[in-house]
Amino acid sequence: MIDVADKNVLLRNDVKKLGNILGEILVHHGGISLLEKVEKIRELTKNLRKNYNEESYLLLKQEISSLEPPTRSQVIRAFSIYFHLVNIAEQNHRIRRRRQYQLQQDGVIQPVSIESAVVAIKEGQYSQEVIQQVLNDLSIELIITAHPTEATKRTVLEIQKRISTILQELDNPMLTKKEKKNLEESLFNDVTALWQTDELRHRKPTVIDEVKNGLYYFKETLFDVLPDIHQELEDQLEEHLPETKWNVPNFLHFGSWIGGDRDGNPNVTPEITWETLKLQRKVVLKKYDEAIVDLMKRFSQSTARVSLDEELVKSVEHEEEIYLTEDDCWPVKSEVYRRKFAVMLKRIREVGKSDVGYQTSEELEKDLIIVKESVEQHQPSQHKLKTIRKVIRQVQLFGFHLATLDIRNHSGEHEAAITEILKVVNITDRYADLSEEEKIKLLESVLKDPRPLLLLEEDYSKETQEVLKVFQMIKKAHNEFGSRSIEVYLVSMTQSASDLLEVLVLAKEAGIYRLHADGKIESGLNVAPLLETIDDLVAGPKIMKTLFEMGVYRKHIQERGDHQEIMLGYSDGSKDGGTLTANWKLFKAQQEIHNMAREFNIGLKFFHGRGGSLGRGGGPLNRSILSQPAETLGDGVKITEQGEVLSSRYLLEDIAYRNLEQAASALLEASAKVAKKSEQGKIREEAWEVAMEEVSAHSLKKYQSLVFGDQDFLTYFKQATPLRELGALNIGSRPMSRKGSERFEDLRAIPWVFAWTQSRQMIPAWYAAGTGLQTFASKGSENLKLLQDMYQQWPFFRSTINNLQMALMKADLSTAKEYIKLIEDQTIADRIFNDISEEYKRTREILLQISGNLELLDHTPNIQESVHRRNPYVDPLNFLQVDLIQKMRQSEERSDELLTEVLLTISGIAAGLVNTG
């Protein structure tokens, strides 16, 4: 068994080893005085945490204020680099712990693994039919995005990956003395390279830069890990439930928004989207090329040793004549499989270039299956051909498009285009001014008319032409890359049914949606609403019911397999109403839309627009899945994997595997439980929902009284956080604000959360939850008992409470107090900060009562220790950030040096707190 008391000893050793190397590098670059300065600041902040006193505080302030360039930037970088090293060590320890579980000889199974889920299903004694139905319904789709919160450069990520690999190799007990010495020298060199690499970007990334950054994870990990997850599920079912031959469908997919998300980003043009699709195809074809070359090396069977089907031999000869020149052919005639692979290799290399190339990925899949089935004829049946089976699974998962690209745009863009089109063709001069009922009636009539609306393109404004080009590009992409290349069009800020009908009309004009004279409909695109604000979430069920009751939309849904996708935004709802209310409204919206869709026999897929940060719905992927209404899990789960979590989850193959295994395990086990509970007729207690409704109402009132009710709140936010300075951190191609506006409504949720996180107040992740919970609990001891029962028995509520604990743990109001000195009017500063402090205490107290913990995160000691480990190193960066911002804002002239140093603190704090924006 794993010794719990000692399980983090090796982690501490790694952190110490890396810290010592960093110390040596500091001495080399800045002399012993630099190391002493860093150590003194660290010790002062550490002591302040243990035992606050005014003398130590003033000494720390003096140390920081007296720092001068270049020492100041070196001190900042020392703490920042330390966090990168700690992050690497912690990830390496996750890999180590997974291996420790796998090495156990006494049947110890790692929690939240695919094996643990299959064993739980076996012990639950589910019928064979129920298990197979659960497998058939299993669906996880993860969508990578380029939201501007990934502060780490790609070059830095590659160095981190090398350091991680070396740490893993150093764990090998069979290393010789010389091998160990060589690895330790390499480790020192890579940490040195990390110190000597510029961590700040010198320009904003272009959209294509972001696309390439996203593709990096497909190339490095995802292409191999996804089929491995499927294979693991097959293996565990075969081992624990061997009496049945199970079918494991392709349940785990990755898609992307990068290059397709037009909402608020003028840099995402149709041309950029097309270039994105080409880059994705280039990556996946190169992967297939490598895979076929590998298979060619492995499948060296000769007809002198095995007998092959004569039909296969003749078909290979025929294909060689059609597709290959004499130089392309495999030279050894008896090695038929290699000859077949030579044909396949040529056809892969000609995809998109000539008629020789495969026209569809299904053709490649068919050729691979022919080889597999032939080899199986002379292979013992109990030994599977896992290598070629993996390649077949990869072709099924990734096609020739690699990742399905979602297109997203703002509803206002579509309305403006439709308004102009209808005016030009003399249908109406004032479409935008019509009532919702009038809009629906008009759009329905257009969709029922097989004739096109459009006149020549030059009759329309540049903006309308740009919208039309997007739909023309989608049609072209379906022809060039296949229908899976773009499947979903997301309408952000959906507020009414007409917002979706407008997109269908635009799709009709591009030939993606077609009505034939006989009434038959073709529809090649899912149109999905994005419900973001609290008001939109409340209105969501009515919007969808209106659409489902319309004959023309119902036919579109039927053509799309009776399937409707609905995206739920976590960022704007939380920004408008606070995290607790937003999460409850999201839960309720899913519940109501799911129940209503069932009445129409329509299947749903909810798309959860979660961020990496807690204030934007973040948290572990498996917990995100379990926090949904249980009855919706069978519909499939789609979740965004946003900028800042990509490197922490998918940079290393073992971490990527573990992250996806946890997600698959959670969904598999929960779906099986739901299947059983549905038969029993009860999934959760009605009293729980009534309680949450009341808690949410109290929380919303408290949140809005500060954010919208206090006229000085926006001043406090802008001055007490590094919001102004964030714009200069080149971490995303998209503007920070919609329309370049200063209004709160137009500020994107990402910088809103990022700025609060930097100042350690983290208001979006917890504020007002305490008032909601405490007000309800204070009405009687039975109410507190009910909340405690909900925590024990309801995954949604447990996830909510645990995320709140995490938020409070990462927030730090003693450090945050430094930021209020940046506010010009100290009366405003004191009043609002005191309110935040009181709410923090209230929230902490009620969370501990509900969870039964003595301290925050007692239930997850690894995370608790990680936060404690980091805090003494994050604090100096916060103190430095405040000092630098103060100097910069007081300076009459712009100082590039000061700005660079502020940006270094931002990058360092982001690395220290991990999930940031």
Image: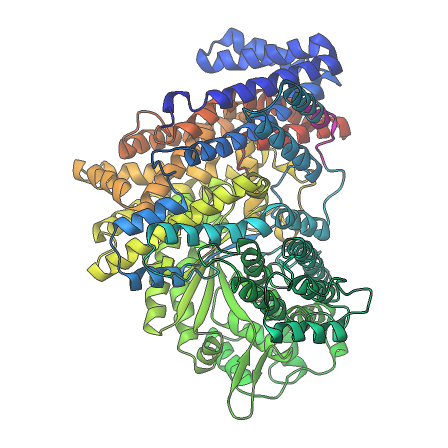
What residue is shown at x 45% (from left), y 78% (from top)? Answer: 558
| Residue placed most toward the observer, 661 or 488 | 661
What residue is shown at x 66% (from left), y 55% (from top)? Answer: 287
Q: Is residue 199 magenta?
A: yes
Count of marks placed on residues: 0
| Residue placed most toward the observer, 436 or 215 | 215
| Residue placed most toward the observer, 838 or 364 | 364
Residue 187 is situated, as x and y percent measured from the top left of the image, at 66, 24
Is 789 located above or below residue 170 in the figure? Answer: below
What residue is shown at x 40% (from left), y 38% (from top)? Answer: 803
Residue 650 is situated, as x and y percent measured from the top left of the image, at 57, 43
Residue 52 is situated, as x and y percent measured from the top left of the image, at 46, 12
Whether residue 380 is visible = yes
Residue 762 is situated, as x and y percent measured from the top left of the image, at 48, 35
**Which quadrant is the C terminus positioned in?**
top right
**Which quadrant is the N terminus positioned in?**
top left
Q: Quadrant of residue 82?
A: top right
Residue positioned most to the bottom: 518
480 sits left or right of 531 in the view: right
Is 756 located above or below residue 127 in the figure? Answer: above
Q: Quadrant of residue 865?
A: top left
Whether residue 906 is visible = no
Residue positioned most to the front: 304
Q: Is residue 848 magenta?
A: no
Q: Main secondary structure of the magenta part?
A: helix
| Residue placed most toward the observer, 716 or 481 | 481
Residue positioned most to the top: 55
What segment is highlighted magenta in the picture? 191-200
